[in-house]
Amino acid sequence: MFHSKVIVTLKKSILDPQGKAVEQGIHSLGFDAVSDVRIGKYIEMNIDTDSKEEAERMTAEISDELLANLVMESYSFTIEPVKE
């Protein structure tokens, strides 16, 4: 079994109004050194397979078809074996 962690974010060319609002909030707290805040999604899932390659394939397919809108978003993921 493998544990997959997927991070979905807006592409750099897409405006992120939520990220901008959070950035302004951070600045209002006095953290002026923070910039370029982007908001995304974080998804974790277990995949019941013995093959890391199969877990990677399944994670990519699920991300392509369900988790990310590939017109506006990109994603990255990591796969780790589940320690039982």
Image: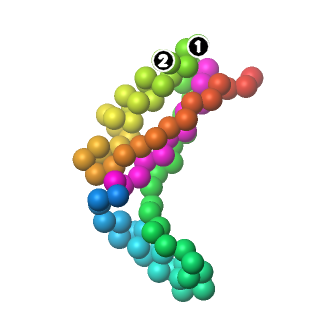
Instruction: Report, in whole angstroms, how far the alpha carbon at label 2 lies from the one at label 1.
Output: 8 Å
Quadrant the N terminus occupies: top right
In this rendering, the answer to whether 73 lies above or below 48 is below
Answer whether labels 2 and 1 touch (C-beta < 8 Å).
Answer: yes
Q: Position of residue 42 (x, y in %)?
A: 51, 48
Type of amino acid under label 1: Asp
Residue beneath the point at 57% across and 78% down: 33
Q: Position of residue 53 (x, y in %)?
A: 50, 18
**Neighbours of disc 1 within 10 Å: few (<14), some (14-19), many (20+):** few
Q: Is residue 74 left or right of residue 55?
A: left
Q: Which residue is mark 1?
A: 50
Q: Which residue is mark 2?
A: 54
Residue beneath the point at 48% across and 25% down: 56
Which of the labelled discs sits on residue 34, or is there none?
none
Q: Main secondary structure of the magenta part?
A: strand
Quadrant the C terminus occupies: top right
**Which region shows up in magenta?**
1-11
Callout 1: SS: loop
In this rendering, the answer to whether 72 lies above or below 82 is below
Residue beneath the point at 41% across and 30% down: 60
